[in-house]
Image (spheres, rainbow, N blue to C red):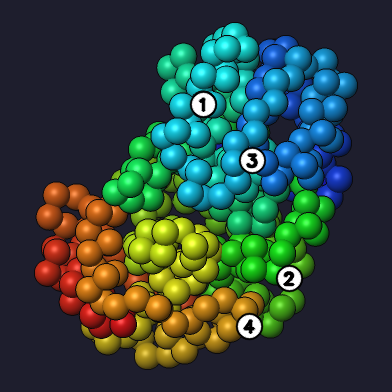
Amino acid sequence: MQTVMVNASTAYPVHIGPGLLEKAGGLIAEVTRSRACAVITDTTVEKLYAGRVCRSLQDAGFQVFLHAFPAGERNKNLTSYGKILEFLAENRLTRSDFVVALGGGVAGDMAGFAAATYQRGIDYIQIPTTFLAASDSSVGGKTAIDLAAGKNLAGAFHQPNMVVCDTDAFRTLPPDTFADGMAETLKHGLIADRDFFEALAHRTVDVDGMVRRNVEIKASVVGEDEFERGRRKLLNFGHTLGHAIEKISGFTVTHGHAVAIGMVLAARAGEKMDLSPAGTLEAVIAANQKYNLPVQCPYTAAEIYAAATSDKKRDRGNIDVVVLEEIGRAKTVRLDMEGLRTFVENAL
C-alpha cells in the first residue's frame, strides 16, 4: 500500500494499492470514532463490491446502512440526491456518523454532496472503484450534482476524511471506462509534469504508479488552491468544452471521452490563437490515440458555444479557458463571450 497525503483545510491520506476493499473498515476505523455509516453506491457497483465493503466495515465494528441509486451520469440529479438525503434521515444518521462514497465519479460526487449538506455537513470517506475516480474526482473535495442547465451546477467543496483506492477494482472495468481515467491522467501530465506525460506516451508506468502520480499532482494543486481561485483552475484543461460535449450528448459521451476531445479542441485553438506552441496539438492527438481516446468532435462550433456559456466557471460576462504554454505547463486565459466564440471556432 502506498499513501499520499492531501494537505487541504482537512488533511487526509489517500491509500493506493491492491486488496484494499477488504481492509477498508480497519483503515477507516483509524480516522473516526463514529460507530455508524451509510454506504452510498450505484446499482452496478452494488453488485460488484458493496458486500465486501459492508462486511469489512461491520467487521471493524460499524453499523452499516446501504443505499444504491440507478447507475449513470443521467441519474446524478436532484431526484437521486434527494433520495440519498431522505435515506440518511430515515436511518437516523447523525452529525457524528459518516458517509462512504463507493463507486466512480458519479457516486463520489453525489455521496460527497449529500455528506456536505446533510445536517449542515458530516464526514465522508471516498472509495473509488474506477480509474477515473481514483485518479481525479475522489481527491480534492469537489462534490456536485447536475442540473438541467449544465453539469455540476449544484455542489460544495467538502474534503473527505480518507480515500481508499483498491487498484484491483479496475480489473472489472470495460476498456472504454478505463480509458476515461486515462484522459484525466494524460491531462495531469500535460498541465503539470512533462516527464510523466512522456512516460505515459511510452507506456513505461504501471497503473499503481499512474494513480499515485495523479494523486500527487492533484494534492499539490489542491493544497495550494483548495477553492479554485487560482492554480486549481489549471485542472480544467479540456473541461470547459468537454462539459459542453457531455451536455449536448445527453451524457451519452462519457466524461473522460469528452475531456479527451476537449483537450484536442483546446490544443487546436491554442495553436491557432498563438497561445500554445506548434506541435502541441499533434502531441495531444497522438497521446489520445495511443489510449483509444477520441480526437474528433461530433458537434458544431455553434452547439459547443451555446452549451459552454452555461458552464459553472463563467464569471458574469467572462470565462477562463486553459491552454498549454508547453507540454507539462498550462495557463488560464480569460475570455469574454465573443472571445469564447472565437476560441470555439478555432477549436473546431
Q: In the rendering, which numbered label is found on residue 239?
A: none
Q: Position of residue 59 (x, y in %)?
A: 87, 21
Whichever of callouts 3 and 4 sits on the residue coming sooner in the sequence is 3
Q: Specify the label residue 83 is tagged with.
A: 1
Residue at 37% of width from left, 59% of height from top? 247
Q: Are marks 3 and 4 in contact (CB under 8 Å)?
A: no
The circle drawn on residue 205 is 2
Q: Earlier in the sequence, mark 4 or mark 1?
A: 1
Closer mark to the observer between disc 3 and disc 4: 3
The vertical placement of 176 against 283, above or below, is above
Mark 4 — residue?
A: 290
Callout in the foreground (2, 4): 4
Mark 1 and mark 3: span between their CA atoms? 13 Å
Q: Residues within 10 Å of mark 1 (few under 14, many from 20)?
A: some
Q: Quadrant of residue 45?
A: top right
Please report the residue visible at 57 percent of the width from the left and 18 percent of the height from the top: 88
Between the C-alphas of marks 1 and 2, the distance is 41 Å
State left or right for residue 39 relative to residue 288.
right
Which quadrant does the C terminus fall into? bottom left
SS of the residue under disc 1: helix
Q: State left or right for residue 230 relative to residue 273.
A: right
Q: Upstream in the sequence, badge 2 or badge 4?
A: 2
Residue 223 vertical placement versus 187 (above, below) = above
Name the residue located 27 percent from the left edge and 61 percent from the top edge. 307
Graded by Cα atoms within 10 Å as few (under 14), some (14 to 19) or many (20 or more), the crowding at tag 3 reads: many
